[in-house]
Image: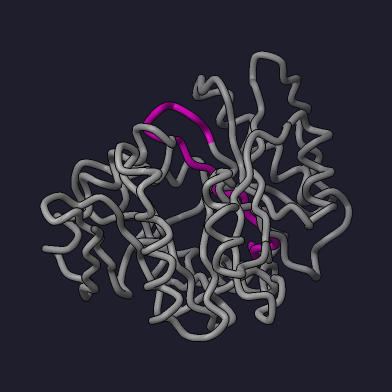
Amino acid sequence: MTDLTWRPDSPEAVAELRPLLRAVAAVDGRPEVAEEGPLPREFRGGEHLLATDGVELVGYAHLDTGGDSFGRQVAEVLVRPDARGRGVGSALVDAVLARAADGVRLWAHGDHPAAVKIADKHGLSRVRELLTMRLDLSDAGLAEPVWREGVRVRAFEPGRDEAAVVEVNARAFDWHPEQGSLTVADVEATEAEPWFDPAGFFLAVDARDRVLGFHWTKVHSGQVGEVYVVGVDPDAQGGGLGKALTLVGLRHLAALGVPEIILYVEADNTPAVGIYSRLGFTRSAADVQYARAEAGSV
């Protein structure tokens, strides 16, 4: 018997959820949840659905009621590893679908066979696929970035560059469900996180110091580097600016001594997948969003 309880977001709810999230991460490799501090952005705000077996917390769903960049609600569903195979995940999905607005999307991280079965049972279709790609730096020969005339690269300066980055980001990712909604407050909040390092946040600027594009890198606690975001203003695209930005960030991460680099890219973003593949990245995993068939794709 699974007992389900909806809870509003609160510090008490976060404290209760953290052990389960860390237990899931220990087996699945995600989500990346610290021992203290705020939860990852995908679990903040909204509503929390707690599943217990009458005694212990065995599953959890987060419903982002604010929605993605297009206003679609998004849910994360997780089951404690030692409680899987008991119908907890299916019960959580039932409850989310009953509570959420039409068009809600549900993430299946890792595209596990169990998630496929639950999706089929609930009449959900694959509407989005997010690839994880990896680069083994021991085998990578990273070329020098080549900048077109009039363009130089510098590091991000906190307190000065937030608005310019957000403006370029909005233009570069107006199609993206999450990245397109980045705000100055979001950037400032990330600056307060332990991993943030302005020395690994590169801006391509013109002679007037106008931001044309950026490459924001990240180093995870396990010393894995990440191409966190690469964005180029549509008016500045062409001439290899995106590739140059990618290379300057990769070389920075390599200089830090991380053994491998990961990135996330939409499976249907053929140009980006092609660039990363030519740089030596290979597909290692996939995350899938499911929704009712009438909700459509990205």
Can residue 159 be spotted in the picture? Answer: no
Relative to the observer, which residue lies in front, 93 or 262? 93
Vertical side of 265 occupied by 189: above or below: below
The image quadrant that residue 150 belongs to is bottom right
Which residue is nearer to you in this view: 111 or 233? 111
Residue 223 in magenta stretch: yes
Judge whether 4 appears above or below 231 on screen. Answer: below
- Name the foreground residue: 42 vs 166: 42
Give how far across and how far down residue 227 sits, in percent.
Answer: 59, 42
Snapshot quadrant of residue 166: bottom right
Residue 5 highlighted magenta (yes or no) = no
Q: Quadrant of the C terminus?
A: bottom right
Residue at image x 62%, y 73%? Answer: 170
Tell which residue pokes out farthest to the right in this image. 239
Q: Residue furthest front?
A: 1
Q: Relative to 208, is 23 above or below? A: above
Residue at 14% x, 55% y: name it.
15
Q: Residue at x 65, y 14 (%)?
A: 138
Classify the position of the N terminus by image quarter: bottom left
Where in the figure is residue 29, as x and y percent of width and height?
A: 43, 35
Task: From the viewer's perspective, tell me whether residue 170 is left or right of residue 158.
Answer: right
* Residue positioned most to the top: 138
Looking at the rendering, the stretch of residues picked out in magenta corresponds to 209-225
Residue drawn at 78 percent across, 56 percent down:
269
Is residue 27 rendered to the left or right of residue 210?
A: left
- Where residue 93 sits: x, y (%)? 43, 66
257 vs 219: above or below:
above
